[in-house]
Image (cartoon, helix red, strand yellow):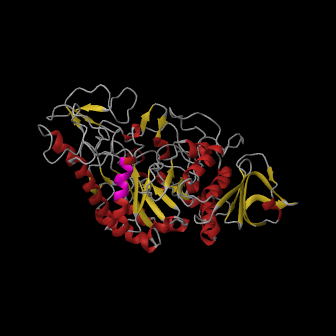
Amino acid sequence: MGTDWLTDAVIYEIYPQSFADSNGDGIGDLRGVIDRLDYIASLGVDAIWFNPCFASPFRDAGYDVADYVSIAPRYGSNADLVELVANARERGIRVILDLVVGHTSTDHAWFQEERAAAGPNPLGDRYIWRTDEPSVGWGIDLPGIPAWVPSPGPRPGWYLKNFYDSQPALNFGWVRTDPEQPWRDGVDSPGPQRNRAALREIIDFWLSRGVAGFRVDMAFSLVKDEGLVDGQRASVEIWREIREWLDVAYPEAVLLPEGDEPRTGAPFAFSADFALVIFGAHASLFDNHAAGTLPWKTPGEPFFGAAGAGSTATFLQAWARWHTDDPARRVVLASADHDFSRLRCGDRTPEQLGAAFTFLFTFGTIPSLYYGDEIGMRYLPGMPNVEGAVCNPGYNRAGCRTPMQWDDGPNAGFSSAPADALYLPVDPATDRPTVAAQDGVAGSTLSLVRSLLALRRATPALQGHAPTRVVHPGYPLAYARGETHLVVVNPRREPTLLSAPEAQAAQFVWGAGAEVRDGAIALDGFGYGIFAI
């Protein structure tokens, strides 16, 4: 079987701080998730992806790890995760953890040991240190902040960071070495080799406890400067070695990257590509810029916008590129995620979500449903900068990280803590969507998601194994799945018509605002339909 289970799977992403608080401290925890597993199973998903839940000082929401083999106390214990994994498995749900291996927290014992030393570790440094004053560094710079950070001492010099100053880059080596720059270890040097061994130990630790795999943060940032020289081949090779080991030790374990896996001509290391929410392919479909515009993004109308002024061209070009080397290559496409906005953002209404979900769950991707999107939770602008959520003046991630809205009780049922003690404020709107208000209610967003995922599960042609053929790329978007089903969605407010050979004998299966009429398919504004052909 191997990782074949992933092809037809639907993922549910949980930001653990914000899902369910079981102990009243204002922060979500694993026990809260265990208590809600029946709800998660009722959605029809196959895997849960947790954002980082390892021990951390949480200067970057857990993407600054202080201990890779310990669950953060605020979430519970290692035993809680093992229990969660087992209970989820009983419901047919696997658990995927977020793994951050390009850097750690400065609180990690590895960094504390090296910063306290007088010089390099004889066994090889786990981090990248230099004693000559840097002029140009390598790393992900924030505006006006250098990539090299002065040592917090007593070790002299500077260390390389990956993002925030509190996230020192782990040493996996450099493609280019230079005797005049001795801090550039080769990829086979002792320090990089120590880290490669530790990476395998961390993965083994959690897989041996029942975890199904990992989504890897900044997966291709490990080896430094190689993008200028060798197209990230050396970083991919690290993961290729991990995959070869997994194929023997844990053949069903999946690895998902943050973004696209670079094509090196070698077999894939990762189980899929990932269409990142903050970049072109996904953004061209769903980003209406209500959450802001990032420096590398060009404002424009999304395809799933009421004005009907967008295009599927960027997405379909990426779709073709993802499949150039392997027509069966799997691609994860999310409703949203923890790093930017939500599907319901700005002026996008619940009425518009049906077409979006129909596309997300039937196009042939691996759908990833972000917690709360199944009830149409809103992106909330103006949220406070909690745990590094604002890392750019026009980029506030907190608005998509607000507490799950369960019912109309205090704090929307998320927590019994005082409102001012919550991780983030709950949506204050009187009409905020909740699970309780939508559960079992015909026409609700939650009922739509459950119905659509049940249809997907019952219809192999709508899952990941079946081929996808685009029939019409504009408004309406129409595509054949497995040559037995036709999916047609109209994201704009104006009605439209699909005249195509596939429509002439189509028989309605599921949808709203869509019907066969005189050999064509007529769609109302925001209409969507699945047809047998």
The residue positioned 47% from the left and 72% from the top of the image is 92
Residue 428 image position (x, y, % from top left)? 53, 45
Residues drawn in magenta: 234-241
315 shown above or below 503: above
Q: Is residue 245 above or below residue 494?
A: below
Q: Residue visible at 64% across and 67% down? A: 461
Q: Nearer the viewer, residue 256 or 22?
A: 256
Quadrant in the picture for residue 452: bottom right
Describe residue 169's horizontal placement relative to residue 254 as left or right.
left
Residue furthest to the right in view is 518
Percent position (x, y) of residue 248? 35, 69
Q: Residue at x 62, y 70 (%)?
A: 460
| Quarter of the image with the C terminus in it | bottom right
Q: Is residue 26 visible in this depiction of the protein? A: no
Q: Per the image, is 250 magenta?
A: no
Residue at position x 20%, y 48% from top?
190
Q: Is residue 128 left or right of residue 382?
A: left
Instruction: Name the dominant secondary structure of the magenta segment.
Output: helix
Comparing 477 with 37, the one in front is: 477
* Residue 361 picture location, percent across and down: 60, 59
